[in-house]
Image (cartoon, rainbow, N blue to C red):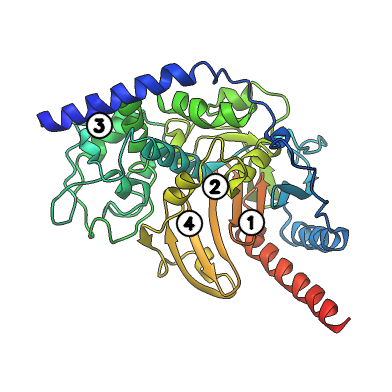
């Protein structure tokens, strides 16, 4: 164990040096990354296609009417340009206040993508390694992996391949139990399936990464999240607490379905106890920044190496009985670090969905074709499960038709 302690000490010393340097820069100035243009580059030609946008808007409005969605915000990026952005409906069915680009939503499990990128940045900087035992940073954790060396590693908790049963003790997260209590319950478990090979989605186990980051960096998870990502990206209105929602005026309420349709529900504290698993709040203005960054257009903050670490396949999810494996043209899916990787016959999509407190969030992009989309719903209307693949299907059909016209001419 002394070797492990020495390893932690070395990593902490390296981090301290980096922290001193970076503190000179990171004071949450959170400037708009859209203004980040390398010297000498001219503003690119607009990629906005008004014909496609009209079709997309028709598609969205049709789904809103069909599924009675109270409200949503949508943003599409091609390359580093916003080519479509629009809001629909109201913040609450009991209010006439319209959703706008600054309206706050809860992101649910889309928060896991932030954790995945943060871990990838720390791995790139050699602050941690994906191969590190979780117990190196959480000595009180007693879970023995079901693999040859019995070691539960960082890559296992981040890719839902711990071997534990699906949603192990997620009920404690729903009950807003504190992180120490949740981890004490996890210590009672023994993996059922092969660690590193079997996929089973987790919330409580995924949240172990917060203690790992805290002990590796000397910062709380949310401080590290702000320090490495939110502040340098300029995501000013992104927050990670109930107060971050209740303390703002321009917020949505989640909705649940009742006899008379969707009705608003009160904001609840659950999942703010494990921010990494589902506790982030953000408006579309900040999600534009986030999509721009994860698509690769902020290499000053998220390097290609970090993106490659996060978006590499760590466990196969092809046979998981979930909606994303039923997309048209589906071939296979994997889980990276906080991100799903879905291959269809026309796209390789980096994707995740989130659901919490009556909110539903969807984010997906094709890194090769440089096209991405974000949906923020203030309900769990049935459109949410189909929104991303419907967008990509429309994109493919439209551009195939356009190419056919060009060939004919």
Callouts 2 and 1 close, C-beta under 8 Å: yes
Query: Which residue corresponds to mark 4?
Result: 340
Q: Nearer the viewer, mark 1 or mark 4?
A: 4
Q: Which numbered disc flags the more N-terminal residue, 2 or 1?
A: 2
Q: Which numbered disc flags the more N-terminal residue, 4 or 2?
A: 4
- Let me know if residue 70 appears in the view: no
- Let me know if residue 179 appears in the view: yes
- Residue 404 x %, y %: 80, 80
Neighbours of disc 1 within 10 Å: few (<14), some (14-19), many (20+): many
Please identify the quarter of the rendering in which residue 234 is found. top right
In the picture, measured across the screen, residue 48 lies left or right of residue 361, that is right
Query: Which residue corresponds to mark 3?
Result: 137
**Relative to 356, residue 395 above or below:** below
Total numbered circles = 4
- Kindly report the distance in space between the C-alpha atoms of the residues bearing marks 3 and 2: 29 Å
- Kindly report the distance in space between the C-alpha atoms of the residues bearing marks 1 and 3: 37 Å
Query: Which residue corresponds to mark 1?
Result: 384
**Relative to 215, residue 96 above or below:** below
Q: Which numbered disc flags the more N-terminal residue, 3 or 2?
A: 3
- Kindly report the distance in space between the C-alpha atoms of the residues bearing marks 4 and 2: 15 Å
The secondary structure type at the circle numbered 1 is helix
The secondary structure type at the circle numbered 2 is strand
- Where the C terminus falls, by quadrant? bottom right
- Residue 276 x %, y %: 44, 37
Q: Which numbered disc flags the more N-terminal residue, 1 or 4?
A: 4
- Kindly report the distance in space between the C-alpha atoms of the residues bearing marks 1 and 4: 16 Å
In the picture, measured across the screen, residue 224 lies left or right of residue 194, that is right
* Residue with the most extreme left position: 2
- Kindly report the distance in space between the C-alpha atoms of the residues bearing marks 3 and 4: 26 Å
Identify the disc placed on residue 355: 2
């Amino acid at each position: 164990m002394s070797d492990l302690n020495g390893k932690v000490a070395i990593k902490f010393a390296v981090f301290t040096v980096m922290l001193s340097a970076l503190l000179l820069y990171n004071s949450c100035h959170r400037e708009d990354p859209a203004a980040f243009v390398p010297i000498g580059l001219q503003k690119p030609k607009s990629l906005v296609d008004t014909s496609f946008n009209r079709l997309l808007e028709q598609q969205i409005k049709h789904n809103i009417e069909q599924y009675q969605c109270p409200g949503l915000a949508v943003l599409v990026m091609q390359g580093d340009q916003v080519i479509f952005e629009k809001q629909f409906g109201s913040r609450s069915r009991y209010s006439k206040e319209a959703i706008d680009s600054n309206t706050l939503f809860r992101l649910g499990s889309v928060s896991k993508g932030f954790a995945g990128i943060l871990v990838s940045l720390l791995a790139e900087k050699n602050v941690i390694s994906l191969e590190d035992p979780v117990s190196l940073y959480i000595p009180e954790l007693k879970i023995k992996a079901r693999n040859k060396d019995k070691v539960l590693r960082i890559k296992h908790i981040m890719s839902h391949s711990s071997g534990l049963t699906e949603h192990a003790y997620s009920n404690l997260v729903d009950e807003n139990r504190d992180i120490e209590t949740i981890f004490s319950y996890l210590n009672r478990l023994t993996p059922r399936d092969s660690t590193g090979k079997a996929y089973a989605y987790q919330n409580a186990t995924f949240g172990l990464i917060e203690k790992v980051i805290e002990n590796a960096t000397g910062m709380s998870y949310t401080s590290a999240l702000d320090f490495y990502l939110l502040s340098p990206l300029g995501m000013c209105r992104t927050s990670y607490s109930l107060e971050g929602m209740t303390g703002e005026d321009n917020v949505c309420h989640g909705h649940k379905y009742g006899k008379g349709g969707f009705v608003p529900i009160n904001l609840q504290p659950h999942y703010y106890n494990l921010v990494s698993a589902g506790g982030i709040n953000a408006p579309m203005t900040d999600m534009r920044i986030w999509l721009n960054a994860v698509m690769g257009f902020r290499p000053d903050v998220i390097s290609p190496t970090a993106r490659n670490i996060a978006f590499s396949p760590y466990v196969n999810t092809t046979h998981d009985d979930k909606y994303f494996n039923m997309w048209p043209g589906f071939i296979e899916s994997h889980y990276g670090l906080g991100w799903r990787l879905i291959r269809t016959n026309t796209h390789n999509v980096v994707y995740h969905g989130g659901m919490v407190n009556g909110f539903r969030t969807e984010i997906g992009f094709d890194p090769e074709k440089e096209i991405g989309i974000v949906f923020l719903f203030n309900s769990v209307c049935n459109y949410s499960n189909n929104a991303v693949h419907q967008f990509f299907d429309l994109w493919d059909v439209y551009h195939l038709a356009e190419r056919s016209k060009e060939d004919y001419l």
